[in-house]
Amino acid sequence: MSGPLDNTMVIDFTRVLAGPYCTMILHNLGAEIIKIEKVVTGDDARSFGPFIDNRSAYFASLNYGKKSVALNLKNEDDLEQCKKLIEKADVVVENFRPGTMNKLGLGYNELKIKNPELIYAAISGFGHSGPESQEPAYDMIVQGRGGIMSLTGESDGTPVRVGASIGDITAGIYGAVGIISALFQRNKTGQGQKVDIAMLDCQVSILENAIARYVATGEIPGPLGSRHPSITPFQAFKTKDSWLIIAVGNEKHWEHFCQALNLTHLINSQLFGSNKKRTENQAKLEKIITKKTREYTAEKLLEVLKRHNVPCTKINSIADVLNDPQVIARNMIKDMDSIDGFKVAGNPIKMSKLTENYKAVRPPKIGEHNEEILNKYINSYNSSL
Amino acid sequence: MSGPLDNTMVIDFTRVLAGPYCTMILHNLGAEIIKIEKVVTGDDARSFGPFIDNRSAYFASLNYGKKSVALNLKNEDDLEQCKKLIEKADVVVENFRPGTMNKLGLGYNELKIKNPELIYAAISGFGHSGPESQEPAYDMIVQGRGGIMSLTGESDGTPVRVGASIGDITAGIYGAVGIISALFQRNKTGQGQKVDIAMLDCQVSILENAIARYVATGEIPGPLGSRHPSITPFQAFKTKDSWLIIAVGNEKHWEHFCQALNLTHLINSQLFGSNKKRTENQAKLEKIITKKTREYTAEKLLEVLKRHNVPCTKINSIADVLNDPQVIARNMIKDMDSIDGFKVAGNPIKMSKLTENYKAVRPPKIGEHNEEILNKYINSYNSSL
């Protein structure tokens, strides 16, 4: 592999999800990721199921291609070796509760004395400032507190979380933006800095037009099932067998949609002749459309609508996604070398000067790279004294 | 403002959401964002409600602090001026359907001849390669096709989209990662490159452990309401008045939780004595816990659980989020200068060498910066001949 972060050395103290997701992105761009793991047990995620050949598939999906150095940071010699590695590092990433790295003697203010070019990135639930900085956080907590759960679900249903841990994941992606920005800035200034990412902040930043709608109208937005708040028809409809998403995004699509379903009398009708009217009369329109869509299987309706250039899609299961021809063509599902049958999501950042591995490199065993890494960096460190 | 992308000039052809979200991130890191807009109508999002003083709150929330140059790209003089601007640019960003920029004479292969250092980022629904590259895409379509909708919703309910447009938004954030990586790489190579981001790819990349679960077990994951698939109790519970999220992430929390609700007989019980058992017997446990939580108001239960150090939270509405003390302390809700009462989400990337504006700078009027920008870059261009 060869990419923008070639020869960038990252010391990675992260565990479980937000942090490892961040360093997975850095790995996919060419960085060398050195996981510092607890001896014997390692990253907590190594014990999360499901397992393939006694190895955690959960762990593998986030830590492929990284290296592992097992150290006991409460042992003085090990801590010393860790500090020497950090002196050589471009980036340190951690997702402990704020203060933990300070207690270990590995806080940013300490580390930057010996390595002023170091970029230190901390990913935490609530950030390194503010009155609730120290509160424990899980994805579920920040999804609930950050507002997105109040927008997600059926309009008269029970609370629903987003089915992937986007509280962790968005923090991981934003962490990568911060780290790479700091690397770029260092080229100009010669100096490192601290990057401080809070999962809760990231949740607020993805609320999008919900904040604008609320401040402009005073109305608190709620969940709308599969519906778009201001475009109609733009939702899932029931067919004879399953659901189909139909996205009528403009008046041209509306015309085509009505033609496809023999509803041409609706095109310029009093009740549905504009998007504004359709949105006002959404419930009525949903009934009329559903009566039609129930006459088709999803497969057949998809074919009819595609022929009329109306944007639509089945709701893909994870099995469907793994077989989607466009997903496969983009190399977004990768096999893993040396673990038969295992697959991970590919890298969504396609760059003309990034040569990707076709397969994902398997994740490390705990401490697998102690010798390689300590020899490479600490020997060269000693010899440079 | 002063940050890592100071003196980075971005020519921004993007409209509506994924692209403008990406360049909003670049703005927040210090870049100069020059929106190239259609004369008279500008970015389509300028016509999206709600409105404050006849200005789109939707548009403002994504385009604050940017500059606007109105050009008719079908007019030869205007196109020429645009090309001259691009010769001076560090970055071009567009989110047209693949091929549109080529038709305008602004494809990457053409632009790089005069500006080999240019970074050209394209954000599209399905990417610039693959059999369905040309299909029309909306957030709703990629959410449905990318798998996340199959994981989100009540377990026996109707389809539910994620309540914010994360199809667009994750593509915007990943776009920023790609662009800044390319800027960093350019410092080493002196050369630009093309970045190609597909919304569908980004959806696949955030599925997280759902892919691992499926490939390891062969079981297709489905929606679970507010529940975590493998940790219990970790979900929303009904109280006397509203819902409360309780996140019992480990055995210590479980002990504290049982003590808080006078359920100590469950701690080491046959049915619920480990996370594995609790997950197997989730339905039974939910009934027992709900009987207890219904005795409390959400407010009171929150207080009791916090006192016992059990992670928990109310499900915040957008109004609640805007008043959350931690959100406010992190400057994650910003006022906008010169638009009274309007607020936008702040920048979640906190960096010690990034000085943020305390308020967001208002968005531009269509063509507001034609004179400033054309003078600055094209005059200096001419004089350098």
Image (cartoon, coloured by chain):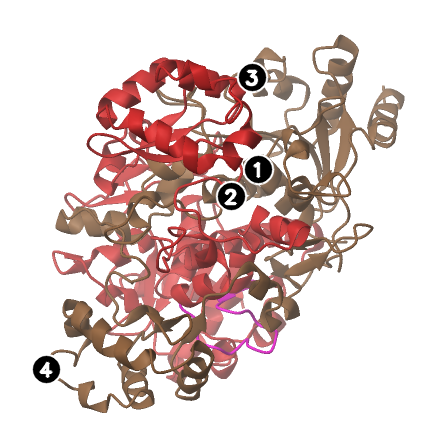
Chain colours: A red, B brown
Label 4 marks a residue whose chain is B
Label 2 marks a residue whose chain is B
Going from N to C along the chain, the mark reached first, 2 or 1, is: 1
**Mark 4 Cα shell of 10 Å, populated few (<14), some (14-19), many (≥20):** few
Q: Are marks 3 and 1 on the same chain?
A: yes
Q: Residue furthest top?
A: B76
* Pointer 2 with pointer 1, Cβ within 8 A: yes
Please name the residue that numbered disc 2 is placed on.
B169
**Callout 2 amino acid:** Ile
Residue A285 lies in the magenta-colored region: no
Please name the residue that numbered disc 4 is placed on.
B270
Q: Which quadrant is the N terminus of chain A positioned in?
A: top left
Q: What stretch is highlighted in magenta?
A: A118-138
**Residue B328, located in which quarter of the rendered image?**
bottom right
Label at residue B100: 3
**Mark 3 Cα shell of 10 Å, populated few (<14), some (14-19), many (≥20):** few
Horizontal relation, residue A344 to residue B323: left or right: left
Please name the residue that numbered disc 1 is placed on.
B17
Residue at 51% across, 42% down: A229
Q: From what the image shows, is residue A382 above or below residue B74? A: below
Query: Foreground residue, A360 or B337?
Result: B337
Going from N to C along the chain, the mark reached first, 3 or 2, is: 3
- Residue A335 position within the rendered picture, expressed as x and y whole percent measured from the top left: 23, 40
Separation (CA) of disc 3 from disc 2: 22 Å
* Pointer 2 with pointer 4, Cβ within 8 A: no
Going from N to C along the chain, the mark reached first, 3 or 1, is: 1
* Pointer 3 with pointer 1, Cβ within 8 A: no
Indicate the secondary structure of the residue bearing disc 1. loop
Q: From what the image shows, is residue B22 above or below residue B378? A: below
